[in-house]
Amino acid sequence: MKQWMSLLGLIIWFGLMPNIVAAQAVGGYAAGCQFEAQALPQQGPGFYVLRASRERFYGQASLIEYLQHLGNQLDQAQFPSMLVADIAKQRGGPFAYGHRSHQSGLDADIWLRTPPHTIDRHQLETLSAIDMVDHARYTLSPHFKDQQRLLIALAAQNPKVSRIFVHPLIKQAMCKAYGDAPWLSRLRPWFGHSKHFHVRLHCPKDDIDCEPQAPVALGTGCGSELASWINDKGGTLSSTGKRKPYRPTLPKQCQAWVKQ
């Protein structure tokens, strides 16, 4: 026994024991990583996970709890379930393709279409998103209905939310539907979000190495700021063509933890 205890002491002394780290988001949303991430179950009350084969369904506890709570709200209200797309990789960091953010386990994409009445694992891998914007006419499409408005409204009301990115026309529709609701400030117009909305949570209060984004401006954001986005019809992001993989400089804590 003494020999084993001596050996254990040597292992600890030379730093060979694996580091025990607490769950935390490190760095920024677009240049960071995460430790002790949790996996969102592939389905639960009020939600399904899309493209599980990509293994992008890991997040910090606050985000996983937020998504499950939102799913429960939908289920209890007998609303259609939501379709959760990309969250983050298990260790975070940049994806091989796609988003620049989603690196610290505090971002999640939720599709604006609703799932079919019956859905299986194969469909969750192959289902296509539905565009809520008629880009040629620059108007909302008939697919954007009350159930989409209600889903976004429920998602935005949670105080954990820092901001939610939506297409400018969707922000405009929410302003018309909800007037001066204080949570409207969290809905941020951003092109490229006409098929899904992107939820971003605040840094957890104990994560001292998590870099927060600047607070949203006071007010609903339904006035001149939104008008500038609506008038910028040429700003719509194109989905065609390939972009080089995004490889930011990660914080020191992430550099050996994340493979780029």
Image (spheres, rainbow, N blue to C red):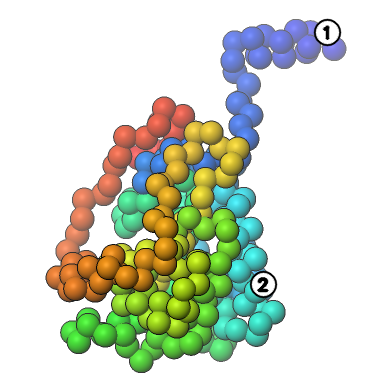
User: Residue 84: image x %, image y %?
Assistant: 50, 68
User: Residue 252: image x %, image y %?
Assistant: 41, 27
* Distance between mark 1 and mark 2 Cα atoms: 53 Å
Query: Which amino acid type is marked by label 1?
Result: Lys
- Identify the residue position indicated by label 1 in the image: 2
Where 43 sits versus 37, above or below? below
User: Residue 186: image x %, image y %?
Assistant: 45, 62
- Identify the residue position indicated by label 2 in the image: 72
Residue that appears at 49% across and 33% down: 209
Q: Are marks 1 and 2 in contact (CB under 8 Å)?
A: no
Specify the quadrant that holds the C terminus. Answer: top left
Residue that appears at 65% across and 74% down: 73
* Label 2 SS: helix
Farthest residue, direction bottom: 142
Query: Which amino acid type is marked by label 2?
Result: Asn
Residue that appears at 33% across and 66% down: 189
Question: In terms of depth relative to the viewer, which is nearer, 95 or 209?
Answer: 209
User: Residue 190: image x %, image y %?
Assistant: 31, 65
